[in-house]
Image (cartoon, helix red, strand yellow):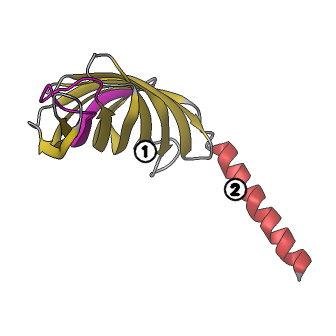
């Protein structure tokens, strides 16, 4: 009985491997332009007296201004429909002015089949600040879905939607000159348009 189970498992694995070879997954690149509007822009900080002593904490909801950016990914197949990739990009939040370079990773799953570009993805990136008010670090998590709106031989035009969470730590006060270290949190929904090749 054990031999029969072992043979069945070997046949199953061999069949999966042959199916994988028939529909060979290949690495691909994407370049996306994204636009999002936050449904939450929270700023947490503390108020200090003129000598730097702690007075009280405060958190405020900031104006919900747009964020736009560009993202490049290189995606390498792990399994038939599962891809692991690297991410590089730029994002700019309009108010308060937050400009970042993003470096990170992405996990994609092509939910139809290996040859169809429609996919779900999870993107995790670290922010490198380009302005004087925010520190490097913290980061960005994005969960989204994209699908092809135009298929060509060498590329696909892609349209997507996503949920995005970003955070950052301040180097300088952005609301009150007597505030301590502050943290900003942005939760957004957005759309992206790009090319996969």
Outermost right residue = 3
Where is residue 29 drawn, in percent x and y? Answer: 48, 26
Q: Which residues are magenta?
A: 170-197
Q: Nearer the viewer, residue 10 or 82?
A: 82
Mark 1–mark 2 distance (CA, rounded to whole Å): 26 Å
Query: Dot 1, how many residues are within 10 Å of its Cα: few (below 14), some (14-19), or many (20+)?
Result: some
Q: Which mark is residue 96?
A: none
- Residue found at x 12% / y 29%: 176
Q: Is residue 35 left or right of residue 122?
A: left
In this view, 175 is above or below 10: above
Q: Is residue 101 left or right of residue 51?
A: right
Q: Indicate the quadrant where residue 67 lies.
A: top left
Q: Quadrant of residue 172?
A: top left
Q: Residue at x 67, y 51 (%)?
A: 19
Closer to the eye: label 1 or 2: 1
Residue 122's tag is 1
Indicate the secondary structure of the residue bearing disc 1: strand
Above or below, 163 against 85 in this view is below
1 or 90, which lies in front? 90
User: Can you name the residue that lies furthest to the front here?
Assistant: 51
Residue 22, image x and y in percent?
66, 44
Please say whether residue 184 is one of the residues in the magenta stretch: yes
Q: Which residue is mark 2?
A: 16
């Amino acid at each position: 009985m054990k031999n029969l189970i072992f043979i069945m498992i070997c046949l199953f694995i061999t069949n999966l491997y042959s199916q994988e070879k028939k529909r060979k997954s290949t690495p691909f690149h994407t370049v996306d332009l994204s636009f999002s509007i936050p449904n939450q822009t929270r700023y947490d900080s503390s108020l200090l007296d003129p000598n730097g002593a702690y007075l009280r904490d405060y958190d405020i909801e900031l104006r919900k201004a747009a964020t736009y950016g560009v993202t490049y990914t290189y995606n390498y197949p792990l399994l038939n429909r599962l891809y692991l990739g690297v991410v590089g990009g730029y994002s700019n939040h309009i108010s308060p002015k937050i400009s970042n370079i993003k470096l990170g990773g992405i996990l994609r799953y092509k939910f139809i089949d290996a040859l169809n570009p429609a996919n779900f993805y999870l993107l995790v990136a670290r922010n490198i600040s380009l302005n004087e008010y925010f520190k490097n670090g913290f980061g960005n998590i994005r969960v989204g879905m994209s699908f092809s709106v135009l298929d060509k031989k060498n590329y696909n035009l892609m349209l997507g939607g996503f949920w995005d969470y970003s955070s950052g730590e301040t180097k300088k006060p952005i609301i009150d000159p007597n505030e301590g270290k502050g943290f900003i949190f942005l939760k957004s929904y957005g759309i992206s348009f790009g090319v996969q090749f």
